[in-house]
Amino acid sequence: MRSSQWPSVRLFAQRACIVAWLALSFASALNVASLRRSPVASFAPHLKYGFVMFNHFPVDIEVATFVEDGSSTVRSLAELESTISVGYAESRAFLNLRKREWLPWLCTRHPHRRFSVEILRMRIENPPTVVGTTHYRCDGHGLR
């Protein structure tokens, strides 16, 4: 090949890569269940999970509050957590509450505080309705 032909081959290769990248991006954005069985999933396995990420909307949420002994102030359970979560402490507490071992762990982190925890399970409707409540007691003996 002559040296004058190399720029056109290089330009063609660049354009082909851009077209392939756009095609893969478009294929990953599609909300198609057949994407798992397509050839795209064989060489880009992360793309087969991309459409599932935003398909699930939680129907029930849990809202956790606590009241310290001798106080009547109801506060968010996120105030007991010392995780740095500026601006999203409530969301962080909600995600941690999904792990069942987090609440006993939180109780052992504060052995000298005595407080009651109330977890409201709410259904997202218009208007929101309370489906159930759970009460826990945290003191020097742990979570009860």
Image (cartoon, rainbow, N blue to C red):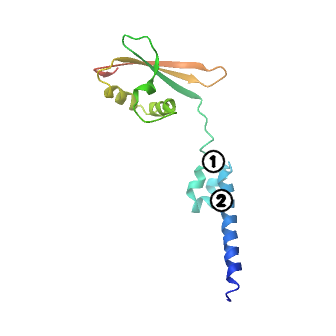
- Which residue corresponds to mark 2? 24
- Of labels 1 and 2, earlier in sequence is 2
- Which residue corresponds to mark 1? 51
Identify the image quadrant of the N terminus.
bottom right
Residue 135: x %, y % from top left: 43, 17
Residue 90: x %, y % from top left: 50, 29
Q: Nearer the viewer, residue 76 or 117?
A: 76
- Which quadrant of the figure has residue 122? top right
User: Is 77 located above or below residue 35 in the figure?
Assistant: above
Left or right of 53? Residue 1 is: right
Residue beneath the point at 60% across and 54% down = 47
User: Is 21 located above or below residue 88 in the figure?
Assistant: below
Does the CB distance between marks 1 and 2 fall below 8 Å? no
- Which quadrant of the figure has residue 117? top left
User: Is 140 located above or below residue 27 in the figure?
Assistant: above
Q: Nearer the viewer, residue 112 or 118?
A: 112
Left or right of 42? Residue 65 is: left
What is the secondary structure assignment of the residue under circle 2?
helix
User: Is 11 located above or below residue 2 in the figure?
Assistant: above
For residue 6, the mark is: none
Q: Nearer the viewer, residue 15 or 53?
A: 15
Front: mark 1 or 2? 2
Residue 74: x %, y % from top left: 46, 16
